[in-house]
Amino acid sequence: MKKIVSFVKFTLLFYVFIALVYWIFIRPQHISWGATATEINMILPGAELISANRIVSTRAINIKAPKEKIWPWIAQTGQNRGGFNSYYWLENLFGAKMVNAKRIHPEWQNPQRGDTVYYGKNEGYAIVSLVRANEYYSLGGWTIYLQSLDTANTRLIVRYPSMEVRQSKFATLYYYSLFESLHFIMESGMMMGIKQKAERE
Amino acid sequence: MANQKINISNKTVAYNGAVIGVVAVFIYSIIVMIYAIIRSSITIYNIMPNGERSNILLANGFAIAYSVTVFSLIMALFSSIAGAIASVVLKKSIVYFNPQFYFNKALIVSTIAALVMLIILYALLYSFLKDWMTFNYIETFSFWFLIPAAIFLTVCIVGGNKLNKALDTRITENMFKKNIQILATKK
């Protein structure tokens, strides 16, 4: 039993180490992963949908493809469409029933303002608030923005307004302890998934 | 047998059960953590170019580790309660149904007791979660219920037998001490 108790103590120490590294070194950079100062301060479409008391993340990635090759993968975003191009096997541990499309589906290429986009099967959903083909796509302020660097390279910028953490102590605790790290994993996964598919085309 | 005094208190058994429950969650969590980090890292490695890779590999790895840590601590709370209750139920079942502390019988008693506890717990959970606890959500069901059920059963069977052995030893020791006392008094 002494060995078992020692294992518990060792694991708890390991967890403390992970939490410290995450909070001191990782979190400050993942809030703006890949984004430049200009991109962080840039006013993106959908900015008017973001209330003042939200923690906003801005992340960016280079894609070796023109906007037109990237857009089709963004257009078919949603559990009820072509998935989120992220780690579907992680999403499915939480009942999402996510399937990432492996090809461009013509029937999902025309998202409209007011369309419903599901995050998981029978789970939460968002309404498409802004959409402009080859330019941007926004779900209530969660904006995916494409910026041409040249004819063959594009910058994919994603801005996410978090939940309103000042609503309650529980919301704050949930946001900092779980939601933020999970969202980073899934959102960076989505950005890399889009990059992989667009560059493969 | 009913008159035999069991020297391992319920409190001790519950404490040990709670600790084992926590250990089971920690081990499962660490396996999940390693799996998720390796699988996502392979994906990242194949997508990101040199120079941009190490940053996201580290950030992703620690973000996964941190998320699993939080889940693990939350689940450890529930698991410790389940472990404490299960171990006391196991002790009572062994003492009642297997007073001679036979090894094979302890195996059967532990298995049946664990199955009964599992059925009761899952029936309760099903009344809240419904479809999520079915094969309609195979990954969710396996991850949150099927694998934990297998771990619970294994821990109960192994733990039940260890407990059976410990109870047997304690009783034998007590009887031995009593006999020595009786002999000493007679002399």
Image (tube, coloured by chain):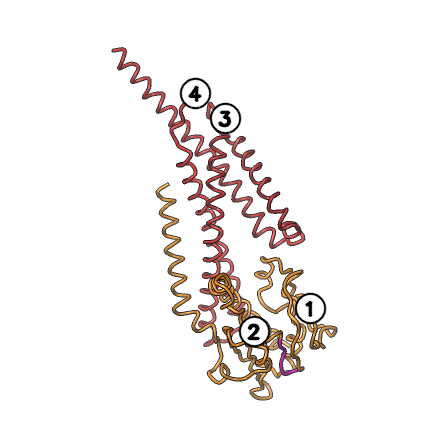
Chain colours: A orange, B red
Mark number displayed over residue A191: 2
Where is residue B129? Give x, y as percent: 62, 51
Amino acid type at mark 2: Met
Question: Looking at the image, which is closer to me, B75 or B156?
Answer: B75
Quadrant position of residue A192: bottom right
Relative to A172, is B85 above or below? Answer: above
Question: Looking at the image, which is closer to me, A6 or B10?
Answer: B10
Q: Is residue A105 left or right of residue B95?
A: right
Screen quadrant of the N terminus of chain A:
top left
Where is residue A6? Give x, y as percent: 35, 47
Count of all numbered marks drawn on residues in the image: 4
For mark 3, give the secondary structure.
helix
Which chain is home to disc 1? A
Which segment is the magenta one?
A133-138
Marks 3 and 2 belong to one chain: no
Question: Counting other residues with Cα less than 10 Å from the Cα at mark 1, is it few (<14), some (14-19), or many (20 or more)?
Answer: some
Quadrant position of residue A25: bottom left
Residue depicted at 61% across the width and 55% down the height = B139
Which chain is home to disc 3? B
Q: Along the polypeptide, which appears first: circle 4 or circle 3? A: 4
Mark nearest the camera among 3 and 1 is 3
Marks 3 and 1 belong to one chain: no
Marks 2/1: CA–CA distance: 17 Å
Where is residue B135? Give x, y as percent: 66, 50
Amino acid type at mark 3: Tyr
Mark number displayed over residue B3: 4
Amino acid type at mark 4: Asn
